[in-house]
Structures are given as C-alpha cells and as structure tokens.
Image: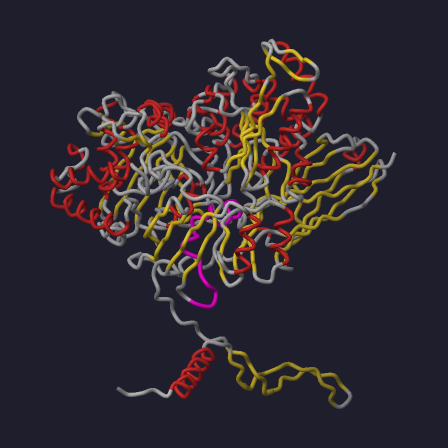
C-alpha cells in the first residue's frame, strides 16, 4: 500500500482550495477605459476624452445551481420552551434557529447586541384573552364571562399600553380589534379603528362600574371586598401560558381582576398542557375562565373580512372544537359576519362599510379581548439565511424549506428550536393547527400556490397559470401577470360540475342532477397545472402523485358531513354548511395538462388569491386538508379505522366516542392504522370505489400499500408529503423531529432565492410645529428605501388621519404626490379653523405594493388660539 506524504498533500489541497475560491471572487484587472475630462488649453476651458489605464473589478459568472430540493441536508426540530434559554443555546451553537416570534424587550436586546446572531422582524403575532362564554358551569358555579357586558368591560379594565410598553418592553402595539396590524384593512378602516381605541381606552373605574352592575344583576354580592355567589367566593380560573410574555400578561390580568373583588386561580401551563383544556374540553366543565391566547397570521392579511367569523362564530370558525360550539353571536352581529365571510357585497365601498359596522359589534361581544400586536424577532445564527414572512416570521413562512441555507456552503445540518413540538395529534383532516406543528408539516409539503412572504399574494408553485372570471362590477383587482382577470356579464355552472356528494352511492352529484335550472355564480376560477404535473412529483414513500389523490381529498370535504357516511362527524356539519353556502361546483376539465375549475359566490379582493390550493384541489394544508398533506393510500388507514369506530379525526368526535384522536406521526393510533394496512393489502381496497375505481386499479393500489409498508418500517410513522423535505423520524417524548432533504423534489434549490429582504418603505414626516388659526399648513412626506426615493408606482396608499386636541378624528384623506417618493398633506385654512386650540396629530399611513406592511408616522403640531 502506498503511503501519502500528508503535510505535502495537505499543502497541495490548500493551494487547490485557494485557487478554487479565488476563481469565485471578484477579480481586478487593468483595462484601458475612456474618460471625459475638463482641461485648460491656450487659456480656454475645453472638454476632451482620453484613454487611461484603470483596474476594473470584474464579477465572475456564478456557477449554475444544479442542486434540487432543499439547500440543507438535514433539519432537526427540538423543543425549547424558554426564549431566554434559546438565545443562550443559539450563542453557543447548540441550536441554529429559534423559530418563534420573540416580543420581550430584554431578550430582544440580547439578540440585537450579539455578534453571533442575526434576526428577522415580523408583525403577525398577537396576544388576546380568550373567554369561556358559558354562563354557568356543570357544577353550578357562576362564570362572570358568560355575561356579554362583563366581557365588554374587560376592554376598559386592561391597560394595553402597559402591556405593550412594560411587559413587552416596547416590542408591541396596543390592539383593539380582530384586524391585524400587518394587513390592508388597517389602512382601509383606520378611522373606525381609531374610534374604538378612543372608546375603549383604559378606564378601570368605568370597568368596575359596569362589572359591579352586572354581577349584582346575576345574583352575586360583594362581601368584605370579595365577590360571592350563593355564599362562596366567585372564582375565576386563569389558564396562563408560561413560555413567553403571556405569563406576565396573565399575572397582570389576574391582578386587575383581584383588585375589583374576584378570586383568581392562576393555572400556569405550557401550550400542550393548556390545549387539553381550552381546545379539547367542553367549556361547561369550567376548566378555565380566561386563557392567555396567542396567534400568528402566517401570511400578510390581504383581506381580514373572514377573520371576524373565525374568531366569533361556530359556523365560520373551528366548528369541531368544543369552545367554538359555545359561541352564540347576536343576530345582527352574525348577519354582518356571514355577509363578509360569504362575500355578499358588490363594491369595495359596501364591503368597507360592513367592516366598519362589524368592528363595534365585535367589541360589544368580546368573547375575545385583543391586547397587542407584537413586533417579534426570530433569531438565527449569522451564518444562515432563510425567507421570513413579514407576518408569519420564519415559522409561518411557506418558503422556509426552499430558502433555509448556510450562506457560504451547500448542505449541512440545521437545528431549529421551537417552544413546543407535536403539541396535538397530527392528522390532515382535523389535527393540530399549532404553528409549531405547521412548520415541519409545511417542510414536508408542496403546494399548487405559495404565499409571497412580503405581499400576501399567491404565486404559482405547481400551477402554471390561472384565469379568474368575475361578474362585472365586483371589486377584484390584479397585481401579478401569472393570473388573468376577466369580467363577464354572467357565469353559469356547467351541467357536469360536481356540486355535492351522495354518501350512499359514493358518487358525486352533478349540477344537472341537482338543479332544474343551472345556477349562476359570481366567480369561476380556471387553474392549469404545469405541463409535467403530476409526473414531476411523488409521495415520500415513492408512490406516484396522481389526480386520484386530489379527488379522494375532494370527497372527504363532503363525506364527513353526510349521515350515511361511515365517517360522519356531526361537529363538522356547521363548517360544511358554511362552505356549501357559497360553493357551487368543481370540475376537472383536462388531465393533460391537469386543469381544475371552481365555481363559487365567495371571492377575494385580489385575483391572485381567488386561486388557492383548496380551489385547485391540491391535497395539502390550506388546500383540501386543513392540517397537513396526505395521499389517498395513507388516508385509507385512518378512514378504515374511523369507519370501524376505533379512532377519530376530530378531537370532538374522539371525545364523544371515547377513543384516541387520529395521529399519523406517533402514539397508539399508529398501531390501529397499521392493522388496517394489513387489511388493505389483503383485500386490495380502493376507497370510494364507485368513483375512484375509474382512476385507480387494484395493481396500483397494491403497489402503493407496499410502498407505505416499507415506509412505515423505515420511519415508524405514516405521515407523507411531496415536499422538499421528508420526516425521517419523530420522537414525541423527546420533542424532536428529524427531516431530510428529498432528492426527488423537482425544483432547483435557488428557485425562491429572490426573497431575501422585504422592501418596506421608510417614511419621514415634516411640517410646522405651530399653526395659527386662519393659516394653511403644509406637511411633507418623504418615502425612501435604502436611501433612494420609493417609486410612486409601487405605492398602494399614502393616506392621512388628522386628530384634534381632544383625540377625535377631525379629517382624513390622501396625500398628494409631488415627485418620486415625495408627497404632501395640505390642510387649508378652513380645516385649521375647525381645530380646537392645543396639540393636534397628523398620522400618515403608507402601504407599498411590494411589501404590504402599513407604515404609520405621526407628527404633532400645536394649533394656536
């Protein structure tokens, strides 16, 4: 065997490495260049051109990217409930990313000051109080929050400024409504939001007066400063999350309630521990009175009209969760909510007025009291980069698996810490919707369309193109060229469109069978997939993706709501009925290329977002499934298990049947489903055979079941996706998930590399500090990005609100463009004359088309007497 001279060989390797690295660096080379100069000749100044030798830096042509799928080889998710500890682990290199939106001032300062760390800022996480609306618990005890007036009064009891500034250290803004700060509606209805902020400003005395009046009306009495009911203290159970600022928020709320005579039991729990109470238990059991809720919008909210229905009603919320089943909004409130959710409006003016009407009604209802919009930062090691959503941060960004990488190298292993892992059961139909679980789920998925992380508009992923046909006059606009928008006089549902499902015959019901006269609809969306779809993607177990996966998932949207179905779930029915109120038909018009049509009376304000994974019939989270992706053949195992009453998709049905909730990743239901894999293999089962038998042969079914069997032996779970990463192993006790790069993913790793920085406008507002009555006042608005004027064509809105010395809204309007990146607000003599003497405020709200984050700047000036 030859021996190698290692010192000499290492030297050669080093020289080769230096040479290769130098080949990738900018090179300075001497070149003759022509320059224009001014010279003196014979007493005259003349302009000449001369040749001079200069070193010109030549940027090398980058090597083309050939790697497919993820940039990294391995992603390990670990549980770390403490933000403070997470930062320490980041600094020591124990973890590489902390996928959480930290909104605590002292911890944020540590991140800002660290040389080892970088961070992304997001604006989509928010805190609230969730109230138990049941008036009397099963044991007969009084629940004060069953009274609407007491819930409303909590808005006055809570000092949101204190929470934002003192508890969150300035890393938050006070929030009063269901509308996200990072949304277009913040600007659209800024006037009514400002009015609610004024109406529900902190007023502890007023809160106490209302609560006292209502408590006495409910039969309670104050004894020695303590509220009592039927001889016992009125106890309020505060379910308080411990992982972040919500612990301090919960303590603050408890202190405020104790100050006015309530006895508060502080029940501190982590997310997983708390979920068994506020999510899974019936509200009437009384396991909580209020819960320190936290949410994250995982994309910029283009349209929040549907959010009010989600947060306040059973029909448009999470109908399978017992808490939502207890929501009983008033008739007027529900009517406006339903119209907004179902797009029952014909113009933006009508829609925005509905929003103005529903906001005060939601605050009167107050099953939730909104507290703060957090300004969160997600830290990571400085040698890494990833696309972060302006609203959803890293953990909410759909692009994270495509963009996570080491800046200086390809491959490698990244460890991501999160406050909780596998918080609830993973199943695509009605499983966990915790963002901590959704992040790895999204890593395992692919999508028909993806959210642009800066605008909240859909961009195509597996789709090639789409056309939205809308009734003439509907308030729909378009921003991107990949989708077409056409307005037409009438849209009729075609005879062969699938409009419902017959659970007994297991066949779709067509429009011709359902209707004597074919209905007309507001929109028709035609979505055409890539030319090589679906052959270009496959399930992680090696099974080919097919249209049959899409159709199986379509069936599931109907079948669970039918009493004749073997998997009927009564808790799903309200959700289904809300869907059917606007749905009018699906149709697959071509298999080459795959083309799907969707007919509906519901519509979004943006043409791009009228296209969706759901409407394109894609079997993923946010598509035909609510919580994760699935193939028809791994779904069959859960389908058979539930049909035989052994497990259940929803926690509501699982509780009713006293069985475990279906979990594709871990737990006892895996063994149940593995038993039905044996049945499927023995019988060659084709689910919903009268329909899917046209798309699946027995041989194809058997091949899929065999692939799944090998997958289970390899990974220990039945969770399947088609994404850039796959789940190799899950360890629920340790709180760890290991994901690996999917080498068969079709896209190049750099497909979404353009999403590196959000172009958020920088706004400066200037004007006179004092204005005399009878004078005109002019205020200048300068809008830049990285020191350059922001192009006016890229600005969607530059509006202003004028508040007088009393805090009342005195005037609103749009700033006038002067030149690129410069606008003016001109307050004429009449406007100034109407202002009372004192300190007035001018608020300018700027919204970019390229980064839909409202930027609000305030300028104070004095109106002289």
Q: Is residue 81 left or right of residue 432?
A: right
Instruction: Please provide the residue range marked out in magenta.
Output: 389-409
> Magenta stretch containing residue 161, yes or no?
no
Q: How many marks?
A: 0
**Residue 408 covered by magenta stretch:** yes
Left or right of residue 556, residue 344 in this image = right
Q: Nearer the viewer, residue 347 or 539?
A: 539
Q: Residue furthest bottom?
A: 42
Q: Nearer the viewer, residue 517 or 758?
A: 758
Q: In the image, is residue 215 above or below residue 456?
A: above
- The front one of 69 and 323 is 323
Measured as percent of width and height from the top left, residue 258 is found at 66, 24
Q: Nearer the viewer, residue 316 or 237?
A: 237
Note whether 661 is above or below 794 in the view shown: above
In the picture, the quarter occupied by the N terminus is bottom left
Quarter-wise, where is residue 364 in the image? top right
Picture layout, residue 524 above or below residue 224:
below
**Relative to 431, is 117 on the left or the right?**
right
The image shows residue 144 at horizontal and vertical percentages of 58, 18
Furthest residue toward right: 865
Q: How is the image coloured?
A: secondary structure
How far across and how far down the image is residue 770, in percent?
A: 83, 42
The answer, for residue 90, to whether it is visible in the render is: yes
Residue at horizontal 70%, vertical 33%?
A: 811
Residue 551 showing in the rendered view: no
Question: At 46% from the left edge and 76% from the top edge, which residue is drawn?
Answer: 24
Q: Quadrant of the C terminus?
A: top right
Give coordinates of residue 789: x percent, y percent. Answer: 63, 57
């Amino acid at each position: 065997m030859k021996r190698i001279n290692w010192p000499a060989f290492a030297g050669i390797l080093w020289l080769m490495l230096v040479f290769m690295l130098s080949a990738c660096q900018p090179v300075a080379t001497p070149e003759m260049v022509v320059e224009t100069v001014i010279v003196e000749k014979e007493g005259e100044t003349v302009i000449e051109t001369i040749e001079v030798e200069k070193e010109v830096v030549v940027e090398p042509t980058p090597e083309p990217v050939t790697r497919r799928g993820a940039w990294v080889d391995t992603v390990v998710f670990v549980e770390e409930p403490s933000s403070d500890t997470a930062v320490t682990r980041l600094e020591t290199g124990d973890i590489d990313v902390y996928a959480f939106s930290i909104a605590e001032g002292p911890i944020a300062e540590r991140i800002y000051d660290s040389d080892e760390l970088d961070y992304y800022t997001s604006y989509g996480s928010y805190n609230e109080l969730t109230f138990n609306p049941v008036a009397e618990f099963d044991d007969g005890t009084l629940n004060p929050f069953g009274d609407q007036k007491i819930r409303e009064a909590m808005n006055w009891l809570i000092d949101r400024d204190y929470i934002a500034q003192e508890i969150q250290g300035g890393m938050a803004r006070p929030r009063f409504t269901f509308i996200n700060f990072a949304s277009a509606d913040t600007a659209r209805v800024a006037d009514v939001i400002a009015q609610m902020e004024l109406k529900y400003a902190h007023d502890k005395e007023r809160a106490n007066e209302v609560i006292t009046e209502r408590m006495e009306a409910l039969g309670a009495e104050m004894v020695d400063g303590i509220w009592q009911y039927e001889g016992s203290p009125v106890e309020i159970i505060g379910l308080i999350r411990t992982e972040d600022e919500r612990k301090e928020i919960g303590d603050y709320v408890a202190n405020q309630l104790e100050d006015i005579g309530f006895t508060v039991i502080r029940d501190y729990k982590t997310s997983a521990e708390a979920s068994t109470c506020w999510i899974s238990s019936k509200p009437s059991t009384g396991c909580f009175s209020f819960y320190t809720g936290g949410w994250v919008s995982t994309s910029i909210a283009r349209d929040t009209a549907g959010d009010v229905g989600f947060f306040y009603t059973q029909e448009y919320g999470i109908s399978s969760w017992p808490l939502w089943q207890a929501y009983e909004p008033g008739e007027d409130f529900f009517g406006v909510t339903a119209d907004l959710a179902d797009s029952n409006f014909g113009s933006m003016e009508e829609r925005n007025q509905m929003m103005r009407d529903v906001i005060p009604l939601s605050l009167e209802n107050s099953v939730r009291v909104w507290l703060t919009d957090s300004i969160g930062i997600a830290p990571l090691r400085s040698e890494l980069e990833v696309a972060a959503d302006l609203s959803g941060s890293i953990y909410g960004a759909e692009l994270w698996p495509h963009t996570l990488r080491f800046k200086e190298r390809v491959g490698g292993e990244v460890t991501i810490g999160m406050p909780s892992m596998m918080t609830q059961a993973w199943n695509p139909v009605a499983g966990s919707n915790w963002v901590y679980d959704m992040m790895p789920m999204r890593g395992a998925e692919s999508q028909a369309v993806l959210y642009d992380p800066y605008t909240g508009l859909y961009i195509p992923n597996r789709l090639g193109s789409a056309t939205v046909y809308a009734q003439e006059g509907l308030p729909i606009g378009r921003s991107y060229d990949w989708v077409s928008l056409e307005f037409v006089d009438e849209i009729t549902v075609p005879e062969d469109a699938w409009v419902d499902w017959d659970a007994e015959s297991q066949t779709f019901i067509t429009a011709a069978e359902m209707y004597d006269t074919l209905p007309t609809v507001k929109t028709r969306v035609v979505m055409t997939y890539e030319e090589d779809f679906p052959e270009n993607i496959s399930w992680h177990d090696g099974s080919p993706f097919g249209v049959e996966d899409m159709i199986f998932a379509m069936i599931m949207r109907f079948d669970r709501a039918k009493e004749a179905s073997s998997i009927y779930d009564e808790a799903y029915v309200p959700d289904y009925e809300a869907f059917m109120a606007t749905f009018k038909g699906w149709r697959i018009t071509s298999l080459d290329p795959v083309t799907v049509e969707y007919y509906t009376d519901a519509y979004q304000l943006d043409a791009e977002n009228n296209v969706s994974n759901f409407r394109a019939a894609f079997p993923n989270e946010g598509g035909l499934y609510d919580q994760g992706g699935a193939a028809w053949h791994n779904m069959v195992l859960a389908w058979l298990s539930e049909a035989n009453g052994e497990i259940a998709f929803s926690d509501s049905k699982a509780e009713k049947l006293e069985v475990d909730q279906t979990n594709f990743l871990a737990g006892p239901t895996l063994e149940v489903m593995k038993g039905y894999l044996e049945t499927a293999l023995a019988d060659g089962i084709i689910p919903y055979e009268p329909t899917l038998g046209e798309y699946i042969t027995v041989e194809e079914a058997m091949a899929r079941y065999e692939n799944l069997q090998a997958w289970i032996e390899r990974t220990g779970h039945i969770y399947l996706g088609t994404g850039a990463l796959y789940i190799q192993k899950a360890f629920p006790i340790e709180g760890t998930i290991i994901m690996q790069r999917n080498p068969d993913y079709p896209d190049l790793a750099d497909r979404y590399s353009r999403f590196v920085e959000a172009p958020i406008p920088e706004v400066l507002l200037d004007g006179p500090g004092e204005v005399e009555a009878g004078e005109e006042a002019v205020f200048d608005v300068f809008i830049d990005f990285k020191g350059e004027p922001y192009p006016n064509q890229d600005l969607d809105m530059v509006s202003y609100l004028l508040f007088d010395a009393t805090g009342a809204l005195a005037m609103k309007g749009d700033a006038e463009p002067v030149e690129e990146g410069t606008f003016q607000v001109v307050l004429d003599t009449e406007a100034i004359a109407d202002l009372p003497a004192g300190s007035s405020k001018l608020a300018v709200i700027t919204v970019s088309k390229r980064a839909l984050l409202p930027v609000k700047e305030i300028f104070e000036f004095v109106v002289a007497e």
